[in-house]
Amino acid sequence: MLHLLREIHEQPQVVDGLLSHYAAPVDEIAAAIERYKPAFACIAARGTSDNAARYAQYLFGYMTGLPAMLALPSLHTLYERPLNLAGALVIGISQSGQAEDVRRVLEDARSQGALTLAITNYPDSPMATTAQYHLELHAGDERSIAATKTYTAQLFRIAQLVSALAPSSAPRSALKRVPDLMRDSLERSVTIEGWAQRYRYADRMAVIGRGFNYATAAEVSLKVKELAYIASEGWSEADFRHGPIAMVRGGYPVLLVAPDGDLLDNMQDLFEKVRQRDGECLVITNRQEIFEGAQQFMTLPGDLPEWLSPLVAILPGQVFAMHQALIRGYSPDAPIGLTKVTVTE
């Protein structure tokens, strides 16, 4: 079996473990954050982990009202002009924990008195040992180059932490449903192989989301680029209207990440505009009935809270990207020119 396929299907099990066996550190870190009372959060990451950081931005704001910004690691390394992060909660996210520029953000922030947290898969990694606190992903070794289970583990760790800071206990209860929702999504994704051939010769596409699923759009787009070498771009639904929609014309594929929730009307309106321009729409949704005329659907479980939907909606995107690689004759486990660990400075 392909490493990538196996790791895609391991994701519910990884999340189950974070719920059942590795939840205790979350409460300790949440208590430290509550004592520290940060003025804002600053999140440093690269690549796939940067998409997890985008999810964290929205979730911190939505659940706690704490403003969250993305760091500018190059200011800390190449320009040697570190930001003043005193009084902040500074989070570094990385699968390997070896991103040197992200580690430098943590190091500089800690020297300024900030509260620092690393989220990685390896407790002895440079980032983990630099930060005051570490949240381990417990995803096991990821042998495929493309990140799958470490990405959803990052999302879930973020959801666990922010839920522990939320004023209500309801979010923590909702987290218990995530493994089963993920299994349901994977079962629904078996249909993708049957129609993926249609896009064998597509060399460009847009992936659109917004809010929580802006992260999903960016991550699906990254996976399509990494695995199938398609010139794909992930866009916010709002930003896509401000110019990029001009690219859409006959047959141009647009993948919409549109689960039920507050943004559904916006996504439906954009869907209609793409259709008017003769674009070809693929939709990840649990409200199939409102996207009449879509070329293909990747369906999601019905009872899915919008704030948790990125953990579930990414799965069909991963499966789609894998099948695009396979039908083009590429190895999904070893994309050309990529390595598992990329160290940026």
Image: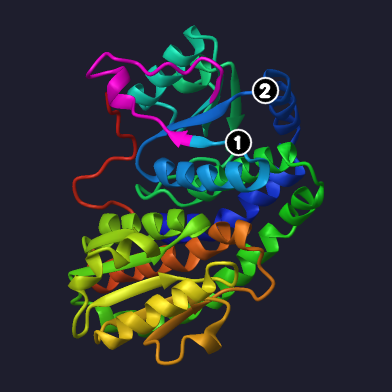
Residue 236 in view, yes or no = no
Up/down of 332 relative to 110, above or below:
below
Q: Residue at x 57, y 81 (%)?
A: 287
Quadrant the N terminus occupies: bottom left
Please provide percent x and percent y for residue 220.
Answer: 38, 60
From which residue to which does the magenta span run?
69-89
Q: Residue at x 49, y 71 (%)?
A: 258
Q: Nearer the viewer, residue 263 or 26?
A: 263
Magenta run includes residue 314? no
Residue pushed farthest top?
Answer: 111
Q: Residue at x 52, y 34 (%)?
A: 121
Q: CA distance from mark 1 to mark 2?
A: 10 Å
Instruction: Name the residue beneath numbered marker 2.
Output: 37
Which residue type carries mark 1?
Answer: Leu
Q: Nearer the viewer, residue 49 or 226?
A: 49
Quadrant the C terminus occupies: top left
Q: Secondary structure beneath disc 1?
A: loop
Circle 1 packing at 10 Å, graded few (<14), some (14-19), many (20+), is: some
Up/down of 243 relative to 188, above or below:
above
Please provide percent x and percent y for residue 30.
Answer: 71, 29
Up/down of 235 relative to 36, above or below:
below
Residue pushed farthest front?
Answer: 242
Q: Are marks 1 and 2 in contact (CB under 8 Å)?
A: no
Q: Nearer the viewer, residue 130 or 269?
A: 269
- What secondary structure do most residues of the magenta stretch adopt? loop
Please provide percent x and percent y for residue 322.
Answer: 36, 65
Up/down of 192 relative to 79, above or below:
below
Which residue type carries mark 2?
Answer: Lys
Magenta run includes residue 78? yes
Instruction: Name the residue beneath numbered marker 1.
Output: 66
Q: Quadrant of residue 297?
A: bottom left
**Label at residue 291:** none
